[in-house]
Image: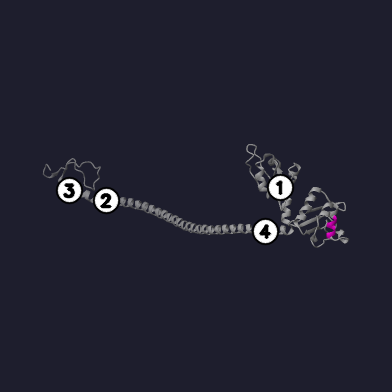
Amino acid sequence: MTKQGSLTLPKNHTSSPAMDPNQEEIPDLPEKEFRRLVIKLIREAPEKGEAQCKEIQKMIQEVKGEIFKEIDSLKKKQSKIQETLDTLLEMWNALESLSNRIEQVEERNSELEDKVFELTQSNKDKEKRIRKYEQSLQEVWDYVKWPNLRIISVPEEEEKSKSLENIFGGIIEENFPSLARDLDIQIQEAQRTPGKFITKRSSPRHIVIRLSKVKMKERILRAVRQKHQVTYKGKPIRLTADFSAETLQARRDWGPIFSLLKQNNYQPRILYPVKLSFINEGKIQSFSDKQMLREFATTKPPLQELLKGALNLETNPGNTSKQNLFKA
């Protein structure tokens, strides 16, 4: 303040908060005018402040609206996330339950596999015992039939005038007169087989002759092999050993191999009850089954080549001693 009755504001002094900050500096005014100006500014301040407050409130409301929108959006997202979490939890529980059931099933399967293995092993043991019993029964039947001879192709009508014993005696006299003179052939039993006559049968039933001694039977069969052809009243018949059905089938199984060996001068024979015998490289060899013959044939290239079809052998030119063998 420089003069009495007037008021001078500093040049850098700004207006009150209610004044426009862009307003120009107030020039030196008399005190009276200054007071008027202050009163005017005071009167105008509330109006400007109210406008600014309304503007601020509007901005606050807009911000609040945006915030509420964001909150609603977050709530929706949170709800979806919660639903997803609930679904995942249900899936987890279902998977856990399924996993437990799978474990139970696996345990059950393991128990069943053990039982199947036990049953399989038991069945194998039973099959072995059955085969053993069948083999024992076969051996018993072959033993019972050991002294027997079987005559094939003698007509049924011959029994009208002769007994079976007389028919057999006539066959011996016709084919082996020396045996008829030298041997005291004793017949224990003679019968047709099967026992019941069937009119529709195309061939006559076989005659089974039971001799008192096995040696007698063997001498007759040896004479049959030497003669090659046996007849009755001039017609061809067959005179063979009598075997059980199983042994007879096993002997027949040697047939193709027997024929090949015979055609190539190996001098094969079927020994009692089902052994195959032949001469190879000057030595007599005998085999009770085809597997034994396979193993032997793989060590003898000429024999292997001869029997490869009958025994299902695979030849290997690089190593004939080791072959892949297959079951007949």
Q: Tell me which numbered mark, 3 or 2, is placed earlier along the sequence.
A: 3
Instruction: Judge left or right: residue 80 versus residue 151.
Output: left
Circle 1 packing at 10 Å, graded few (<14), some (14-19), many (20+), is some
Q: Spot the residue most to the left.
A: 4
Instruction: Kindly report the distance in space between the C-alpha atoms of the residues bearing marks 3 and 2.
Output: 21 Å
User: Can residue 144 be seen?
Assistant: yes
Instruction: Judge left or right: residue 300 versus residue 17.
Output: right
Dot 2 lies on which element? helix
Amino acid type shown at disc 2: Gly
Nearer the observer, 62 or 97? 97
Q: Spot the residue most to the top.
A: 318
* Residue extent of the magenta highlight: 164-170
Instruction: Kindly report the distance in space between the C-alpha atoms of the residues bearing marks 2 and 4.
Output: 126 Å
Instruction: Judge left or right: residue 242 versus residue 86.
Output: right
Total count of labels? 4
Residue wearing tag 2: 49
Residue wearing tag 4: 136
The overriding secondary structure of the stretch rendered in magenta is helix
Q: For residue 123: magenta?
A: no
Amino acid type shown at disc 1: Ser
Q: Nearer the viewer, mark 3 or mark 2?
A: 2
